[in-house]
Amino acid sequence: MTFKIRTALLASALVLGAALSAQAARTDIVIGMQLEPPNLDPTGGAAAAIDEVVYANVFEGLTRYRSDGSIAPALASSWDISTDGLIYTFHLQSGVKFHDGTDMNAEDVKFSLDRARAEDSTNAQKALFKGIASVDVVDPLTVKVTLSDPNGGFITNMAWGDAVIVAPESIATNTTNPIGTGPFTFTEWVKGDKIVISKNPNYWGEAVALDKATFKFISDPTAAFAAMMAEDIDAFPGYPAPETLPQFAADPRFSVVGGNTEGETILAMNNKDEHFKNVKIREAVAHAINRQEII
């Protein structure tokens, strides 16, 4: 069975529990997460945990990433690019509805892109939209995007979680009650515990195999290990206790999958702190860190 649920690998390993390792005929899944998202609007927050839950599950963009990193059509079934590379004409999928029953059309695409590139935009990846000169609705299923300069990466930019298509009717509440077009609908968010999404029976595309997915927040490494061993969690991307991975690898109930990530962990000093205001102290800390040992 192929589970069509997208989660990002934010660390070096993914631990799969017994049910998934055996490819059991399940219609639900429980995913472990280290961090709880601060909100559920990927167009207004920088936290990676937001996309881990909603990207390609609840929200979709004009294009999307395939598992191999290539770009595929999503809400745009196809697109044309002018010979000078400045005009992108997107042809939208027909019959797409938001989870509240409203139609997704070219006006929603224009709203989403104009909102993302607006001067007061809080989009974490506002630079993705910087080169857009104008967005014009040609007809309900056709949108023309004009760039100020050619950008060979524009189609890729439209696949980012920050570029998903949202509706003006629901944007105000997307932080806590996300309304998208994806194969899953938002069900509940128990703060400090879990987020549940459910199969969208009216999805415009290929139906997903799962009826329900639960994202369980477990930041404590000891608790994460215990949850996996008890088989309370089916999979844990970015597993927080790497020292226990050999134990999982030796247990036939589990599979450990290693991978790469584009995620970065930044260690910085707060220059407003009374101690770190002193450049000599900052230099001393910098000299004291063994960078090679960390790497």
Image (spheres, rainbow, N blue to C red):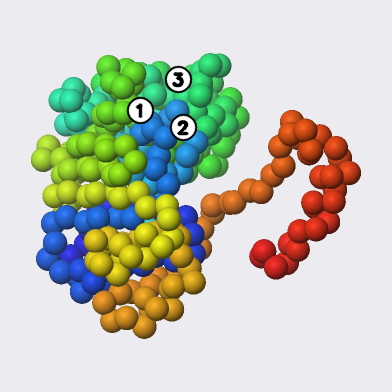
Q: Which mark is residue 19?
A: none
Identify the secondary structure beneath mark 1.
loop
Which residue is at the front of the view, 9 or 56?
Answer: 9
User: Looking at the image, is mark 3 or mark 2 earlier in the sequence?
Assistant: 2
Res 105 visible: yes
User: Looking at the image, is mark 1 or mark 2 earlier in the sequence?
Assistant: 2
Res 9 visible: no
Picture quarter containing residue 141?
top left
Task: Tell me the residue that label 3 is attached to.
Answer: 114
The kind of residue tagged 2 is Gly
Residue for point 60% across, 30% down: 149
The kind of residue tagged 1 is Thr
Reply above or below: 289 against 110.
below
The answer to whether mark 1 and mark 2 are in CB contact below 8 A is yes
Task: Tell me the residue that label 2 is attached to.
Answer: 45
Front position among marks 3 and 2 = 2
Residue for point 66% across, 48% down: 267
Reply above or below: 83 against 215.
above
Q: Position of residue 110 (x, y in %)?
A: 38, 21
Report the Cα–Cα distance between label 1 and label 3.
19 Å
Q: Is residue 70 left or right of residue 289?
A: left
Task: Tell me the residue that label 1 is attached to.
Answer: 175
Report the Cα–Cα distance between label 1 and label 2.
9 Å
Identify the secondary structure beneath mark 2.
loop
Picture quarter containing residue 272?
top right
Q: Residues within 10 Å of mark 1 (few under 14, many from 20)?
A: some
